[in-house]
Image (cartoon, rainbow, N blue to C red):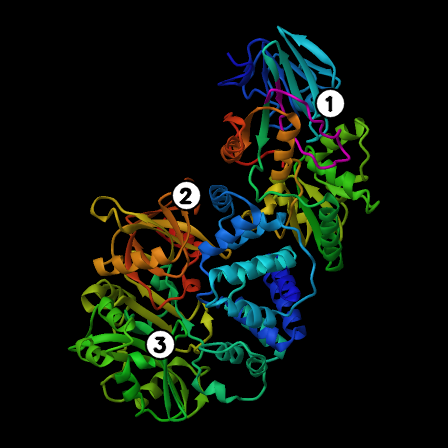
Amino acid sequence: MPLLTETSSGLWCAAGGFHIDPWEPVERALITHAHGDHARAGSAAYLCAAQSAGLLRRRFGADARIEAIDYGRTVTLGSVQVSFHPAGHVLGSAQIRIESPDGIWVVAGDYKRAADPTCTPFEPVRCDTFVTESTFGLPIYRWDDTRTVIDDITSWWRGNADAGRTSVMFCYTIGKAQRLLAELARVTDRAIYVHGMMLGMIDAYRDAGVAMLPIKPVIEKTGRAKPSFAGELVLAPLSARGTPWMRRLGDVSDGFASGLMRVRGVRRQRGFDRGFVLSDHADWPALLQTVEDTGAPRVLTTHGHAEPLARYLSERGLQSGIIRTAWEGEPSGD
Amino acid sequence: MRRFAALYDAIDSTTSTNAKVAAMVAYFSDAPPGDAAWAVFFLTGRRLKRLVPYAAINDWTLAATGLDDWLLGECYAVVGDGAETAALVLDQVAVESQGDVPLTEWVEARILPLRGMDPGSQQARVSGWWAQLDRSQRFMLLKILTGELRVGVSQTLVVRALAQTANLPVTTVAARIMGDWAPTAEWFASLLSHEHTDEDRSRPYPFFLASPLEGPVASLGPREEWVVEFKWDGIRAQLVRRADNVHLWSRGEELITQRFPEIAAAATRLPDGTVLDGEVLAFRDNRPLLFSALQQRIGRQKQVAQMVRSVPVVFMTYDILEDAGIDIRGRPLDDRRRLLEERVPSPGVLRTSEIVTAATWDDLAALRSQSRTLGVEGLMLKRRSSAYGVGRKRADWWKWKIDPYTIDAVLIYAQPGSGKRASLLTDYTFGVWDNGELVPIAKAYSGLSNEEIAELDRWIRRHTRERFGPVRHVEPVHVFELGFEGIAASPRHRSGIAVRFPRMLRWRTDKKVEEADTLDHVRKILEGAR
C-alpha cells in the first residue's frame, strides 16, 4: 500500500494517521499553507509550519487547535517521521516530508523558486516520491524577473498618476498583496491604499516581521468631503471588483497581478486594462528544475495542468501519475 | 517595427476607446508614411495572403524550442491563438538584440519575399528573425505571418484616428479607405491629403447600415415619419458612375463589376457623377429568386455570359448618395428618394425599390408575416428625415426581419460528421466576436447543400490551423448566417448562451469575418426573447 492515498477528503497517510490539506473536516490535518484551497476549517487538529500558524489562526479563529513546528524539525506521527520545509510560496508555506521504512515522500504543496522578500526561499528535499503542483505546468508559462515586473507596475502607476487616474491592482489577499508591498518598498516609500479585507493578513505578515510599505485603508479617506484617490495605488481583492466600493476611487485603470495574466486571451476575457505576470507558483522551467533537484524517480502531479506535466515527465523516463483534487480551475493563491 | 509593436502594446493595454485612438494618432503623426501605410493595412484587419502555412510555423516552433507536438497542442488549447502560443513558448529562445528595422522593410524586403521560397529557406529566415526580435516584435511578426493581426480596434476607430491626425472629416477618410489600395507612402499621403485625388473617383461611400429592430415597432413613433421598403435578400452594393466609368462595390469592399456585366451596362445610361446604393438580386418574372441562385453568380468569374442568361440579376436601388458629382448624403431621405426616382425612371436592370404603403404599423406587421411568400427578408424602416450616415447608427434605419432569430457567425472549428458524412467535415462550430476574440456560440450540422459541404470540406482541409484529435481549428474566414428557434442563458456554455436548433441558413460569401455579429448582439437577442 502506498504511503499516501487519495480519499474523498483528500490525501491520507494511514501510517501516520493524518490528512494533508484535506477539503473536508478530519481528525488531524497537516497544512502546507494558508490559502483557502489548502487550509479548510473544521478539522479537530492542525499541524503547520511555525510561520503559518498566525495566518491559520486568523482564518480558523482562536478556538481551532493549531500546532506549529519550525522548518526542518522532525516529529513522529504514528509510524512515520514528518518534517516541514520551506516552499517559498507564501509566508509559512511548507513542503511536507514523510519518511517511512518504505521510502521518503515529499508533498510540495504550492511552491515557487523565484525570490520573495516575504517568505523563506524554497529548499529542495531529496525524496523517492515527489508530489508537485502543476498550476502552470505548460511551457507557455515562464516568468520574467520580478524586478522587471515591478518596473512595469511602477511605470503604469506613474502613467496613471500623470493622467489623474487611480491605479487599482487586484491581487490575492494572502501572499500577493504582501509581496507587492514588500517589492514596491525597493522603489518607493509612499504609502499604499488597501481594501479593508486585506488589513488582517497584512497585519499578520507584519507580526511575522516582514518589512513592507506603510498602508492606509481606503475606508479612512471616505467621510471627508470628496476624497480623491487620483494618483494613488490601491490594492484590492478580486471580490471588490465591480462593487459600489469601487465608485469612491474615481477614474481608474485596473490591473491584475497573476501568472494567469501571461495569456492575453485570459486578460481580455476578464477585461483588465493591464495584466502583470507576477506569480507565487513555479513556472515551467522551475517545475522541471525542482523535479530534477529532488532526485525523485517517481513524481505525482496535482492542481492545474497535471496531465501534460505527468506525460512530459513519463516520456523522459520518470514514473509519473496524477492526483486529483477537489479544486479544479483557477488557482486561488495566484 | 519597434514603434509598431509599441503601438500594438499601447492599444492592447487599455480598454478605453479614447486611449486607443490617442495611441494611434500619436503613431500616425510620427511614423514614416510607408510604415504608417502598412500599419493602416494591418490595423484594419487586412492580411498578407498565402505567405506560409500555419502548419509550417508550428513545425518551426517545435524545431526552435525542442518541444513535442502534443505539448504545443496543449499550450494552444490554453492560449487559443496560434501566433501567441508560438510567441510564448519562443520566450525560451534568447534574443540577440539587433537594431530596429522599419515596418516597411520588414514587410516588403523580408516577409513578402517568403512567398515562393522553398520551405527550408523560409524556415531558416523566420527562425533567424525570431532570434533577433524582442518579445513584442516577435509576437508582431508571428501575427503578420499567421495573417491574424486584429488588435481590438475596429476600422471605424482607425478611421477616427486618421481623421484626427489629418484634421479631415471622418467621412472623407472612411471613403478613401474603402476598396482596393496598396499600402505605400504615397497612398498614405493621399489618405491624409486635403486635396481631392483621382483615386477618389472610383471609391464608394461607406455603407450606412440598418440595425435590427429589437423592440416593439410602435416604439418608433408615428408611422408617417417612416419610409418602409422590403428587405431584399441579395448582395448590398454601391454603383459608382463617375468619369465615364462604372464601378460596382460589394459591402465587403470587393469590386464586383465584372461579375454583373448587365448591371455595368445599364449603369452607363446614368448621368456622370451618380452613386446609387442598393441590392444585387437574382430576379425573374418580377420577383426575386432565392439567394442560393444569386450565389451561383457570386463565385463565378468565368463563363459569366452564360450565367447572365440562366440567372438574371437586377440592381434594386433604394438610395442615391451622389448626384451631378455632389455628395448629397446629408439631405433628407425624402429628397434623395424623389431624386432617385427621377434618375432611375424605368424598371429594367436598374430599378427602384418599391415603397411599401401599408397605412399602420399593424398593417405592416401583417405584411411582414408574409415576407417568405413575397421572397423578401422582412421590412426596412427608414426615417423620412434621415441623412445617409456612416457605419451603423441606431436611430434612423431599422431592419425588421422575419423570424427565426439569425446571426452571422464565423466558422472556427470543424470535425467529421457521423454516418454517411463520416469522411466529411460537416460538424461545425461557429463563433461570434467578443472583445476581438471569437467565442463559440453554436454548433450546426445542417443547412448546406451537398455541393457546399464538399467545397467547404476541401477548404477546411487546406486551411486547418491546428488539430485536436478529430477537431480542426480553421482559419476564421467564412461567415455563415445561422438561424435558430430559441435562445436561453446557459452557464455551461463559454458564451453564456445556448441556442436551440441552430442551422446554417446560408454561406455569407459576401461578408467579411469582422462583419460577423458580436456576443453583445446575441445577448440583446436573448434579452428580447425574454
Query: Which region is colored magenta?
Result: A105-129
Q: Would you say residue A114 sits in the magenta stretch?
A: yes
- Residue A218 shows up from this direction: yes
Quarter of the image with the N terminus of chain B is: bottom right
Question: Which residue type does callout 1 highlight?
Answer: Gly
Q: Are marks 2 and 1 on the same chain?
A: no
- Residue drawn at x 29%, y 76% is B301
- Residue A216 shows up from this direction: no
Q: Which residue is mark 2?
A: B493
Chain containing the residue with disc 3: B
- Residue drawn at x 30%, y 58% is B458
Q: Would you say residue B445 sits in the magenta stretch?
A: no
Of the numbered discs 3 and 2, the one sitting upstream in the chain is 3
Task: Find residue A212 and report its horizontal and vertical position in percent.
Answer: 80, 37
Tell whether B409 sits left or right of A227.
left
Question: Which residue type does callout 2 highlight?
Answer: His
Alpha carbon distance from label 1 to label 3: 71 Å
Question: Which residue type does callout 3 highlight?
Answer: Ala
Residues at circles 1 and 3 in contact by the CB criterion of under 8 Å: no
Q: Nearer the viewer, residue A200 or A135?
A: A135
Q: Are marks 1 and 3 on the same chain?
A: no
Chain containing the residue with disc 2: B
Task: Find residue B367 and report its horizontal and vertical position in percent.
Answer: 23, 66
